[in-house]
Amino acid sequence: MKYINETVRRQDRLMPEARALELLRSSEYGVLSMVTEEGLPYGIPINYVWDGGNSIYIHCAPEGKKLRALAKNSHVTFCIIGNVNLLPGKFTTEYESVVLYGEARTGLTAEERMKALHLLINKLSADFKELGDKYAHQSFHRTEIIRVDFETFSGKCKHVRTAD
């Protein structure tokens, strides 16, 4: 996965790669954007887990609009919003965002799907790992896992300096 910021219009607002990776690791959710079967834009907020490499995992039902869209066109973007601070008196907003570009994959092996569920449990329900494992095994047959493999990503931020 390559960090590419050349395409960011406001070069003065580039986010350091380390911060972009920290947001990818620690954020609870992002917006997955794709194209529907009908060719229309479709973005949905989802929780996810990063594998520490080039991919994230998403869990969902084994059928639905998202999977139909990805079957037709597997290219996606994934946007994570970091810290946001509205500054009404300055008519601006401080923000952080990361956009990743990649391809979604389904039809993973049972082993990879269970690994992904355990990564999700460790991230989102760390205090309930034993119960989460039991739940993952019980609901495995009705859970699909999507792996999104990223090729590139970029990050942008705005921080307003305050007068001392």
Image: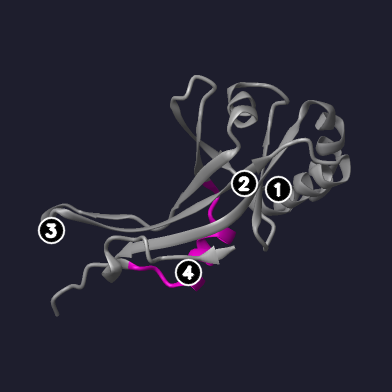
Mark with earlier residue (3, 1): 3
Per the image, the residue denoted by label 3 is 90
**What is the spatial separation of the Cα atoms under label 1 and label 4, in whole angstroms?**
21 Å
**Residue displayed at 51% across by 72% down:** 18
**The N terminus, quarter of image:** bottom right
For the image, the number of numbered tags is 4
Residue 69 on image: x %, y %: 58, 27
Which quadrant of the figure has residue 72? top right
Mark toward the viewer: 3 or 2? 2
Query: Majority secondary structure of the magenta segment?
Result: helix
**Residue displayed at 67% across by 53% down:** 123
Mark with earlier residue (1, 4): 4
**What is the spatial separation of the Cα atoms under label 4 and label 3, in whole angstroms?**
25 Å
Instruction: Say if mark 4 contacts mark 3, CB within 8 Å.
Output: no
Per the image, the residue denoted by label 2 is 48
Asked whether 18 falls inside the magenta stretch, the response is yes
Per the image, the residue denoted by label 4 is 19
Q: Residues within 10 Å of mark 3 (few under 14, many from 20)?
A: few
Looking at the picture, tell me which residue is in the foreground, 3 or 95: 3
Asked whether 81 falls inside the magenta stretch, the response is no
**What is the spatial separation of the Cα atoms under label 2 and label 1, in whole angstroms?**
7 Å
Looking at the picture, tell me which residue is in the foreground, 3 or 144: 3
**Residue displayed at 27% across by 70% down:** 12
Mark toward the viewer: 1 or 4? 4
**What is the spatial separation of the Cα atoms under label 3 and label 2, in whole angstroms?**
34 Å
Tell me the SS state at disc 1: helix
Range covered by the magenta-colored residues: 14-29
Q: Tell me, for residue 120, which label it has, or none.
A: 1
Relative vertical location of residue 20 with respect to residue 85 in this rendering, above or below: below
Instruction: Say if mark 2 contacts mark 1, CB within 8 Å.
Output: yes
Mark with earlier residue (4, 3): 4
